[in-house]
Each structure stands twice: as structure tokens, then as C-alpha cells.
Image: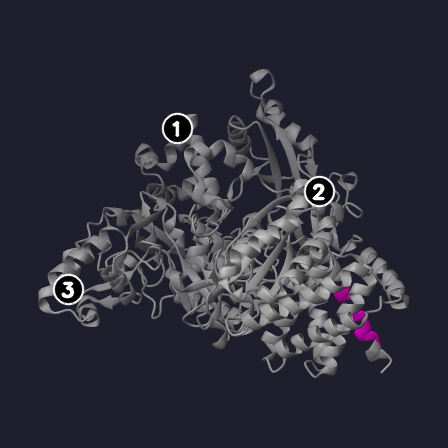
Amino acid sequence: MKLNLSPTLLFRTPMFSFQSDLEACWEELKKAISVSSGDFYEAIKDVEAKDLSALPPKISFTIWKYFNRAKYRSTPYGTFASFSILSDAIKTHATTLIIDEEQIVHRFIDWPYRNQLMLDFDQTLKENGFLFSNSSFYATLDGIRYIACSEGIFELSEIGNDEFVMSILNACLKPIRVQDLILKLELDASQQSDLFNMLKDMHDLQLLFTDQDPNIIGEDYFKRIGEQKVETLPQYLIAERKVIDGGVDRSLFKSVPNLLQLLQKIIPKEERAALTTFIQRFSKKFEQREISLLVALDPEMGIGYDELEQSSESDDFVIQFNNKKDNKLSSDLKSGLKKSLSIERFEPGKTIFLNKLDLVLNEKPSPLPNSLSILLNVIDDLIIMDQIGGVTANALAGRFSMANATVENYCKEISAIEEQANADVLFFDVAYMVEATVDNINRRKLVYEQQLSILNYDTSANPLLLNDIQVSVRNGQVILRSKFLNKRLMPRMASAYNYTRSDLSVFRLLCDLQHQGIQSNLSLPLDGIFPELSYYPRLQYQNIILNAQKWRVEKTAFYPAKVQLSVDACRQYLTNIGVSDYFKAGLSDQTLCFALASDEDLTAFMQFMQKQTSIYLEEVILPKQHVVVDEQEKPYLTQFILGVTHDERIYNEAPAINVEAIKPVQQIFLPGSEWLYFEIFCHQQRADEILVNVIGSFIQAHGGEIKSWFFIRYNENGDHIRFRVNVKDVADNQVLSASFADYLSPYISNGLVSDFYLRAYKREIERYGSDLIEQAEVHFSIDSAFVLSIFPHQPDSFSKYKFCAAIVVQLQQDGVFEVEELRKVVKLASDSYNNEHHLDAADFKKLNQQYQSYRTSITATLDGSQQACFNQLVQSLVSLLQDKEPGRKFKLFMDLMHMHVNRLFDKNQRTHEMVMYYFLLKDLQRSKAIG
């Protein structure tokens, strides 16, 4: 994987140079404060620079904090920091970056103001405005269910079934003008009044949106509806500084690609617990089926997501335990690093170099996303990393697309890289809004080809619809597909919004899916791996600082006996524990920077400590050579956003949908119909005996009344056998059921069978296709008959593996697979099961030793009747697989072999399947080697 550094750099600078003086900046600082805190501004608006020293301590401290932020912190907020963008910024012979001191302030109406707008639906009707469906609607047994939002709380709403409502919703799946809707519905003039009343009701219920309703992506909402930016209205500001000249030295970044690939191999993949649970529950309930995403997330018809649907205030006590953070990531990382990195090596002032450690590397790591961001500072010849990773570089850049066309184009370039690397996969942005106070950061231009709008208006050319999205689980991964476009869908969010704040299940699932299958977190925080230490050293890779030094301090150190230390005593204490000349304290990006030599800063620091109990101080390094200056050569502490990309495919297209495979066919057979379905709950080790003595005897006695039959083993809600019988005449059902119960009765009486149920049979049409399901059921019967025929002879595991191998060899000899094609599919299957079982070098050594025993073992012989059953089984497989297109053939082969192995072994079936494929692959590789 070749990683490329984007030549375009976004960077952020604080309002003032870190060398600025408060008195000289006072009037500008007041203007910035007036926007961020009107109340505090009222208290200081008449204060002049010469009077600052006479202010009360509390006000002085607040001013100090604002000024500190304006010098040291580059996080965008009003005019306290600015963004800049420079194309072709990374140069072979770089010069200092020169920026305008003056900010360009892009002014937008503050998002919460939308709640004060009074929208007139009648005006929309009169002006022939656009209508757009809330695409979260879907039909239930007797109603229409959809997502609505009331006062920031999402809810699943439902109205009674109404064909007229449904026809309106379907007609408005793409924004449509009112008059065009009338034509589409073929209504005459006398019906328009009823339509308008219905439209108004549907708008009130949030089933419809108009073009006067907000959109969070695309053209600015307020500008789109003609709302003028009036100075008296609250403002959302994005400050920008233009770049005059210069660039950044390419050699500074030469170690970045190697660092990322190293981190990729040492940091364990972080699985989203909610997504893992969803996959497990989906697989249990829907197996291989593809269903509507909205139905899957329905708490009644589906499985929900992350227990969000069941949450209520009374559940808070219980839910806190469900939501406890999984510490597996830090535990795995700690165990991986402990051989080469231990706290005994954490010596004050001594840097630990990651590139000099003997690290345990994962040689099959999860792929990196096609684009990611690095937040970093350039200090002389060092790079200091603040954040590494994410699912797309657009997450940090997207918010600035509203203010600058160059940023918008840069974001589109990033999305194009992602899309071109993954042909036939459709990336889409998720338009979500609910928190008026923070939704400003979600406002952005459309930088992906498609967008999905959740409960907001959509201005894109072809909106993606929630009720069009289908979901399935394939090979342990969630797959989304657009039914209309027949393409795999991949969600992205070009926003830095913290999506875990949301309680909307579909939004949380889409955002979690961004992280599926990729390594999106490359940060390596020492304090996360080794928590609660009193000191952390620098962690560095070449010239890249991954972790600056940290020192833990307690409030009591500065307030012994609750009396504040003098400034000199404070300085002496910090010096004694080794604190750097400059240091910062605070959480995330809400930090303050202090100079050890400054009495004013240390006074402020002790005031800051009054509200702390224990806190970490982090080393701050100031540059000697300035990377970014303004025209007056005043230097700025700059945070760069470096984009990193690669063009390797990381997502496969959606499994092909066979038109023949989706023809209507009966899926569910209730008790009393042509299929009988029994569940027999028993211990795994008793199952084979019941299969032979009960099911075998029953089949032998009633063969004339049965078309076909088959069994499968299951462990959902307890180990059990699922036995299905296709009867010739439904009139025999009662007699057959009673007879089977008689055969089973002794086992129930003795407690060897714990439970026995008659169930409805639901065909796995999504797995096998409606065109093949009946043939598959006949095959299952042939497979079951062969397996049952060999049980009395109790063949060992090696013999069962060899039976499987013989089937596969025969498939190749009969022309179902070419030799190389067969090796490919077996290797894919083997790799998949090996990964599932997390095999390491020691495990492979054991498997190779066992393979030698397997090769020399004697296979159980088949008698004439058993051989006939085996031949019939092979021919059934040939018939099912022959002439199928490759993708479907591979999947069908793996599904049918999976079922065969399940029937052969009474326990640990997936592990046996892993061993079977491993041995089979070794056989195929060996035959290739010897020609």
C-alpha cells in the first residue's frame, strides 16, 4: 500500500501571534469576546487597555483565559482562530509561510435562529413550492411507520394505513413541485382541496418536508430561502486568512508514511461493540437474508441498534452497565507492547523512540481508509502529532467548505479518490441535524456524489432514500445496498460532529459502519495504555513526536493546608518535577498554555487549579524557527491538517442480485402445511444417537408418505436439531407428527431431550435464491441421508475431512471448477476461517503437525449403500453448482459445504470447517507442487 501525502494543506492559526501583548490586542479581543459571550462583553466593553491591571481578579482571570486561547489555541471558534488553505503547499525547497494578519470573516446566520422562523405551508402551496418525503417511512401490518423528532427527541411514529398517503409519499421521493404532484396523482380540480389539507397534515406530522424546511448539506439554508443576513441577527462566523506566499519542507514529512504503516500493524483494530452485537443479532434472526434497513432497526419487527429504542429515563441505571467502555483495545495494545515498552523505561527527560523498539507486528492488519487526516504542529525540525486517523480526510475539512470554494474542491478531490479506488461502491454523505447549538459544524457543501438526508430537506439532484437501503450480513460484515441503484453503499460524514451524542439508531449505525473493516484509529496515547501514572515520557518516531511529556499534579500540592503557594514556590515545585518551560492543561482542545517563567501565567495556573483535583500538565514546545508568520513577521502557533490517501480497493461491490433468484416463491410454511418442522433440544453428544435411532427410524417407517427431509444442527437458545419434513399429503400431518413424538417419547421421558417444538418453516430464500431453493431442499435431503448412513460406523474426524476433500476433488474432475479456480475459492474460505479463529504462528504450527497425521491416516471405508449415497450427494452438488456465474457459484459452494460440515460433526462445527479447509488447501498446494 503506497501512502500519498496530499499536496494541499489546510491549516489553522490562532487570532494573535503567541508573541502578542494584551494591551496592544485589547480592542480586537473585545470584539471576539462580544460574539462568543455577550454577557461577559457587557462587563468589559468600556474597559480600556490602560485599565486592565486594575480589574478584579475574577474578571482579570477570564480575560487572561480568552487572550491565552487567542494566542495558543487554533481550534476554530468565531474569530478566535482562522483557517487557511494552500494548494501545492509541500515543497522541496520550502520557505516560510506568510499569511495575511487580517482575517476574512465569513458570516452566516446562526443555526439556532431557524427555530424562530415561522414557516407558512399555505405559502408553499400558493407558490408551487417543492415537497419531499420523509424517506424513513415503511409499511407495517396495518399502518405506516416513520421516524419523527419532537424537541430534539427522536421517536418512531405510526399512522393508520392509507393508500392515498402512501401514494403521496411515493410521489415525493424526489423533491417535486405541488402542481407536478397533482398531475402525477392524476387529480382533478375538485380533489385539490382534499389534497392540500392532506399535505398540510402530513407536513405537520413530519411525513413531508417543503423547500422552506432546513437542509444541512448543500447551499446555505438561510441564503436559499432568501433570509437576509441582518446585523441584529445572531451570527455564525468562520474566519479565514489568505496565504500570501511560502510552503512547508517536504523532508519534514518523509517518515510519515512509514509511521502510519507501523501504527497500522501495532494498534489492534477497534471494533464498535454496538456493531458487533448488531451483526450477531441480525445473523441469528435473519441469517443470510437481505431486508430493509428500516425494518432491521425496528424494535418490534427487527432487532434495533445498541438498545437505543428501549432507552427511557427509568432504564438509566441498567443502561450505564451496558454502555461501560470495553477496555479490550488498550489491553491488547498493552500486551503487544509490554515486551518492548514498559513503565520501567519511563525515565524523566528520556525520549522513547518507537523506531528503536522490538515490536510485535500484525502482518495482516486491517486496511487503512482511502483518506485520513493528521492534525499536527511543525516545530523547527520536529512534527508533533495531535491526532491521527479518521475514516475520511473530509471529516475535518468539510466544515470549511461553506466558506471557501477551494476547500470545497479539495473535499471533492478526496471523495473522488475514495470512490475511484472502490469501483461499484457508492459513497454518500449523511445529512443529520438535531442539536441546534452545535449543528453549525454540520453545515457543509455536498462533496460526495450522493447524500442521505435524515429528517431534513434535500437539495441534491438525486437524493438517496432511507427506505431504499437494504441490509444484510456477509462474512461477518454489514453490507448496505441501494435497491434502486443496485450498488453497495458506504456511509461517510464530512463533519467532525461527535455522532455518539445521537440517540437515533439509524444514524448511529451508519456512522459506526464508517469504521467497519478498516483501521481508523492510529493514535497511540501512552496514558491510555498505561493509565494513572505520575509521569509519561516523550514517545517519538524519527522526527515525529507521538506523545509529549506529561506530569500529573494534585491540587493539594499548590494549596497545602488549603493555602495557596506563592508564585515562586509554585515555580520551584514545577521545576523540581521536571515540567517544561511551557506547558498546557485542560481536556481535549479546551486547553490553556502557561509559561513557567511568567508570574502572571503561574498566578492564572493556580487559579485554574482551584477547580481541579488532579490533572496532567503536557509539555509545549515553542519554535525557534517560525513556519508561519504574517506580513509583519509575527509568528503563529499553527496546526496543520495533513491529508493522507491511497488508491487500493478496500470495499468490494455488493453481492450480485440474480434476477431469477428473486422471483416470488412461498417462504413461510405454518404447521399443518406441506412442511413439518420440529426442533429437538438435546446435548450435542446425544444428537447423533437421536438422528440415527429416532429420525432414521421415523424416515424408514414413513418413507412412502415423505417427499424429502433434512436436518441441521443449531445452538441458538440451546443446542438442538432442526428436522424438516416435506410431506406428500398434508392430510397425513397429524399422524406423522404423532408418530414422530412416539419415537421421541423415551428420550423425553428420560430427560435426554429437554424440549420439543413444532415450528413454522421459513425458507432461506435470500441465501439460495427462489430459483434454487426447492433444488437446495432436495440436496439437503440427499446430504442428510448420506451423513445418517455413515453415523452407525462412527467415522473419526480425519475420515470426515477426507469425505469433504473427496467431494471437492470430484467437483473439479466433473468440471464444476477449474484447478486454479478451486484453489482460489478454497484459499478464500480457509483465510476467512483462520481470521475468524485468530490463528497465530503457534496455531499454524499445530495445524501443520496435525496435517501430517491426517495425510497418513486411514479413511473409513464406505459400503455399497453408503457409496451410492455419496455418489448421489456429489451429483446433486454438481447439478446445483454447474453453469452458475462465478460469484454465485463460489458463495453457493461455501454455503452448501458449510451445511455439510454442520451435519457431519456434533460440536465445534465452525472449527472443524476451519481445519477441513486448511487441510484441503494444503492438499491442493501439494498437488500443484508435485505437478
Task: Name which of mark 1 and mark 3 comes first in the sequence.
Answer: 1
Residue type, mark 1 in image: Leu
Furthest residue in direction top, as rendered = 561
Q: Secondary structure at mark 3?
A: loop
Residue type, mark 3 in image: Glu
Rendered-image quadrant of the N terminus = bottom right
Q: Secondary structure at mark 2?
A: loop
Q: Which mark is in front, 1 or 3?
A: 3
Marks 1 and 3 sit apart, C-alpha to C-alpha, by: 58 Å
Does the magenta segment cover residue 917? yes
Q: Residues within 10 Å of mark 3 (few under 14, many from 20)?
A: few
- Which residues make up the magenta segment? 915-926
Marks 2 and 3 sit apart, C-alpha to C-alpha, by: 66 Å
Marks 1 and 2 sit apart, C-alpha to C-alpha, by: 40 Å
Magenta part, dominant SS: helix
Q: Looking at the image, do the residues carrying marks 1 and 3 touch, with CB atoms under 8 Å apart?
A: no
Residue 242 visible in the shown view? no
Q: Secondary structure at mark 1?
A: loop
Viewer-proximal residue among 157 and 81: 157
User: Disc count in the image?
Assistant: 3
Left or right of 165, for residue 218: right
Q: Which mark is in front, 2 or 3?
A: 3
Which numbered tag is attached to residue 537?
Answer: 2
Q: Is residue 177 above or below residue 57?
A: below
Does the magenta segment cover residue 362? no
Residue 344 found in image quarter = top right
Which numbered tag is attached to residue 127?
Answer: 3
Residue 459 visible in the shown view? yes
Residue 809 found in image quarter = bottom right
